Image: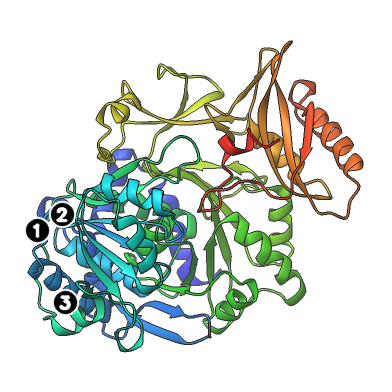
Amino acid sequence: MNRRHTELRDELLAERRLTTEQYWASAEQRLDWPLARGLNLAHECCDRWAGDRGRVALTVYDAHGKLTRWTFHELTRASRALANAFVESGLSRGDRVVALIDQQVEAYICALAAWRAGLVYVPMFVGFGTDALVERIDGADASAVVVDRRYRDAFARARERLQVRPTVWTISGADGIGVARGDYSFWHEVRSHSTDFATVATAPSDCATLIYTSGTTGKPKGCLHPHSVLLPLQSFVRHVMALGCDDVVFAGANPGWSYGLYTVGLAVQSLGVSRVVYAGQFEPSAWLDVMDQEAVTYLATAPSAFRQLVTLAAKRGLPASIRGGLSAGEPLTATLTEQWNALGAGPLQDGYGSSEMGMVLANLAFEDRVVPPGALSSMVPGFDVVLVDHDGRPGGDHGIIGVRSVRWPILGYQGLDDLWASRTVGEVFLSGDVARRDEDGLYWFAGRDDDVIVTSGYNVGPAEVENIIAAIDGVAEVAVVAAPDPDRGSVVRAVVVSDGATDRTHISTEIQRRVKERLGRHAYPKIIDYVEALPRTEVGKIKRSAVRSVP
């Protein structure tokens, strides 16, 4: 461990010994100025670092290997020009700007411009179909839509059904290709407007982002995030990724979701740390090439991407510069963790959170104990996580994950005030997810509250069963759900994707044997079905409501 990491370790460990009030006071001191003066994400995520004109914020690789580097100074100038264009077009403080943009620099320029103009940024996943776009754009009451030319036709189909009438800002190709009559041309507007813009004075509690949940259960809901969301995000990034000024983060998450936009996106930049993104379709070999060329030190992406990366890296290796990785979205399996560890690239860490709470549980950096795969070692500093029942009462070592007395609360759900109010009981915000805490104080994610399987009076968490099954030879993927049973009410059902090479009878026998041994007879799958692929959301999470109906 070099001197910088030793100093950072000592600093983080000292912070973890602070009281909650002391901790948040120290977090405020890391901002460019006191919260009483206001807080704007554009300033903290970009402008404060722009004085060093050579400091690189973002490097973008396209599918052909061409790279473009953007300094903090350049991002500041481009987003100021776009903010001027937004205001000149008639947008005013509080208006919503939808972004239908992929992993490309324009997503971050657009977010920064919206925030500095006092607008609300609304990112959307580019893979949404017409119905999904209509629901979200109307729900957001959008005043403007910024869309890449590749998705202009998809937006046009949705536009015919919209109740709102947003202006359209198209990111064109060469020679203006893709811009329809009546559109604003994104880059023409940036280049033709002044880079002088006085960032709007926003309060920490002012709304900055409306971001939709991924919809793994129920309809997607729009979460209203204030500018102060940065403080708990910085807490997670600092204490998990332990980033320093010489780190380079490969951010393999789409900015249409909160994890890509914030957690491994602009929260990283808010620390002055450089990021690298790949703008092409996911290709493990291309990712490894880029990480090698850029001497990436830390990799952050989803488990589905990690699985493909470690398979290829087992043959060709990971770049020697990588010292660790961060996975989020689904619990880590023992198999994936073991494969990563075999590469000798430092720890593969896990984190748990949601758009409604931020990231609240994680495997922190500089832990002095070995954490088994699938477990989360600690609360993220600044949070008070409790396991409770539906009435907010402590549930002992098993219960709904709740967060008590949230210091930097999310503002609510767009248009769903009653639903948001129902999520808080007393002083505890209920996540809707269930976990248990073992005798060593480790947290084990069990599943959604409405996904927990009650069989013969026992509660079975699907995530724990899945973690065991995923480690069995021949199992490529698995989802565990309840199946109705006339005698037991429900039984455990495993829906499995096999590797195609291993005998399924053998796999089924191993599944039942290992789950019985590890969790007990009440938890083993009475039903095992095989499918070619599991239904997933656009972000790659298993869609359990659809798994239940898989024949």
**Image coloring type:** rainbow
- Report crowding for label 2: few under 14, some 14 to 19, many 20 or more residues within 10 A (C-alpha): some
Q: Residue at x 11, y 81 (%)?
A: 194
Residue that appears at 53% across and 26% down: 450
Q: Position of residue 52 (x, y in %)?
A: 26, 82
Which residue in the protein does label 3 denote? 81
Q: Which residue is mark 1?
A: 92
Residue 192: x and y in percent read 15, 84
Occupied quadrant, residue 343: bottom right
Query: Where 160 falls versus 270 (above or below)?
Result: above
The residue depicted at 81 percent of the width and 28 percent of the height is 516
Q: Amino acid at mark 1?
A: Ser
Q: Secondary structure at mark 2?
A: loop
- Quadrant placement of the N terminus: bottom right
**Image x and y of residue 478, in percent:** 71, 43
CB contact under 8 Å: marks 2 and 1: yes
* Mark 1, secondary structure of its residue: loop
The answer to which of marks 2 and 3 sits earlier in the sequence is 3
Q: Residue at x 58, y 74 (%)?
A: 287
Give residue 235's position: percent from left, percent from top. 38, 52
Q: Type of residue at label 2? A: Asp
Q: CA distance from mark 2 to mark 1?
A: 6 Å
- The image quarter containing residue 305 is bottom right
* Front-most of residues 500 and 259: 500
Name the amino acid type tagged 3.
Ala
Q: Nearer the viewer, mark 2 or mark 3?
A: 2
* Quadrant holding the C terminus: top right
The answer to whether residue 12 is above or below residue 402 is below
Which residue corresponds to mark 2?
95
* Marks 3 and 1, how far apart at CA: 15 Å
